[in-house]
Amino acid sequence: MAMPMESTPPLFEVDESQAALFHALAEPTRLALLQHLSTGEHRVRDLVEHLQLAQSTVSKHLACLRDCGLISMRSEGRASWFSLTDPARLHSLLALASAMLSGAGAAPTVHEHLHDPRVGGGPADGVDLREATGQAARDDTADEKGPR
């Protein structure tokens, strides 16, 4: 007869607003926007010029960041000025993320993560990732030299 296992309470609670925050931080363009805003307040047109993206794309990303409370906007005439709402906490959060990755010995790139079959991804557009990264060539060379 199996013994009932005692349930350990979770170390932390998770809610949808946290998921929205991490979703906002998961997009490289939004991280680039946050990084540029860390230099000070900027207008949309400044951000468009800096990132060399369409105004509609920048506005979409700004709306996501604003919905999560990461940035704020003020109007001056016809211009909208954007700034970080809490630069110190954002810096701490990103530093903690770096420390977690470093402590785990992980340094994935977005491309590697999105195309990793272990996390539900796969090669994009039929590209062989082993070939794209040169792994196939290294494997072929290893085969020619024999077992290691």
Image (tube, rainbow, N blue to C red):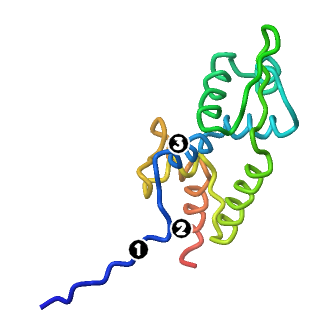
Q: Residue 85, percent across and down?
A: 75, 39
Going by the numbered disc 1, the residue's amino acid type is Pro
- Residue in view at x 44 percent, y 70 percent: 10
Q: Residue 135, percent across and down?
A: 58, 57
Q: Earlier in the sequence, mark 1 or mark 3?
A: 1
In the structure shown, which secondary structural element does the residue marked by tag 2 occupy? helix
Q: Residue 130, percent across and down?
A: 54, 53
- Residue in view at x 79 percent, y 17 percent: 45
In the structure shown, which secondary structural element does the residue marked by tag 1 occupy? loop
Label 1: how many Cα within 10 Å (few below 14, some 14–19, many 20+): few
Query: On the image, numbered disc 1 is attached to which residue?
Result: 9
In the structure shown, which secondary structural element does the residue marked by tag 3 occupy? helix
Q: 57 or 139, which is in the foreground?
A: 57
Q: Which mark is residue 143?
A: 2
- Residue in view at x 49 percent, y 53 percent: 116
- Residue in view at x 65 percent, y 64 percent: 101
Q: Residue 71, percent across and down?
A: 71, 34
Toward which corner of the image does residue 84 lie, by quadrant? top right
Label 2: how many Cα within 10 Å (few below 14, some 14–19, many 20+): few
Looking at the rendered image, the disc whose residue lies closer to the viewer, 1 or 2, is: 1
Mark 3 in CB contact with mark 2 (< 8 angstroms)? no
Q: Is residue 11 left or right of residue 55?
A: left
Going by the numbered disc 3, the residue's amino acid type is Ala
Q: Earlier in the sequence, mark 3 or mark 2?
A: 3
Query: On the image, numbered disc 3 is attached to which residue?
Result: 20
Looking at the rendered image, the disc whose residue lies closer to the viewer, 3 or 2, is: 3
Query: In the figure, 33 relative to 100: above or below?
Result: above
Label 1, label 3: how many angstroms apart (C-alpha)?
24 Å
Quarter in which the C terminus is drawn = bottom right
Toward which corner of the image does residue 82 lie, by quadrant? top right
Going by the numbered disc 2, the residue's amino acid type is Asp
